[in-house]
Image: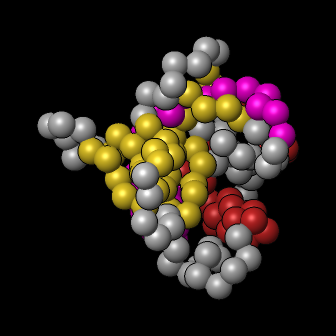
Amino acid sequence: MLFRPEMIPLIRSGRKTQTRRLVKEGDYALYGSYSDTIQGVVRGNRTLWRVGNTYAVQPGRGKRGVDRILLLAIRRQLLVNITHEDVLAEGVSPERTPTWKLGCLLRFGKLWNSIYKKPGTRFLDDAEVWALTFEPAEADNG
């Protein structure tokens, strides 16, 4: 899974435990047998992510994996519905000011917009995303 190089230390320390990826045309969720929780995401005929699997952490496209993460949960949501707790789990540092929650949200929006520049993918564009929750992992089980 691709991450910006500056996110790698946050993943290693356990401060970054979520990432969001755009929902693309043809994506669909896999559900558990007796559950309404998402267990995986498929695009076309390829499974992108599955809860319980580990994935390489790559600091860029074509770069060698430097760590592994274990996928714990998947949610589908509108990006603008991100919670303050989710912003912190994305690795955004809190600042203790009277408006610190708004500041965190604005910093996340700025980070998102530095990655996604096309119309319809920007922070305030009502983009749909997969919210992936993970933790650092030692061994590969998927």
Q: Residue most toward the front? A: 45
Magenta-drawn stretch contains 13: no
Image coordinates of residue 22 in percent, x first then y, are 55, 64
- Residue furthest out toward the bottom: 119
In this orientation, which residue lies closer to the viewer: 52 or 7? 52
Question: Viewed as shown, does residue 105 lie left or right of 82?
Answer: right
Residue 5 seen in this snapshot: yes
Q: Is residue 66 magenta?
A: yes
* Image quadrant containing the N terminus: top right
Q: Residue at x 79, y 49 (%)?
A: 61
Q: How many marks?
A: 0
Q: Nearer the viewer, residue 101 or 3?
A: 3
Residue furthest out toward the top: 139
Q: Is residue 69 above or below residue 91?
A: above
Using the rendered image of the protein, determine whether residue 99 is visible from the camera's viewpoint.
no
Q: Which residues are magenta?
A: 63-85
* In the rendered image, the vertical position of residue 135 relative to residue 44, given as above or below: above
Instruction: Examine the image and state in which quarter residue 101 appears.
Output: bottom right
Residue 68 location in percent, x, y? 66, 26
User: Outermost residue toward the left?
Assistant: 34
The residue at the point 67 percent across, 32 percent down is 56
In this view, 141 is above or below 10: above
Is the residue 37 above or below the residue 56 in the image? below
x, y percentage for residue 103? 70, 64
129 left or right, relative to 57 = left
Is 75 displayed left or right of 70 in the figure?
left
Residue 19 point in image, percent of width and height = 60, 49
Q: Nearer the viewer, residue 15 or 32?
A: 32
* Residue positioned 59% across, 38% down in the render: 17
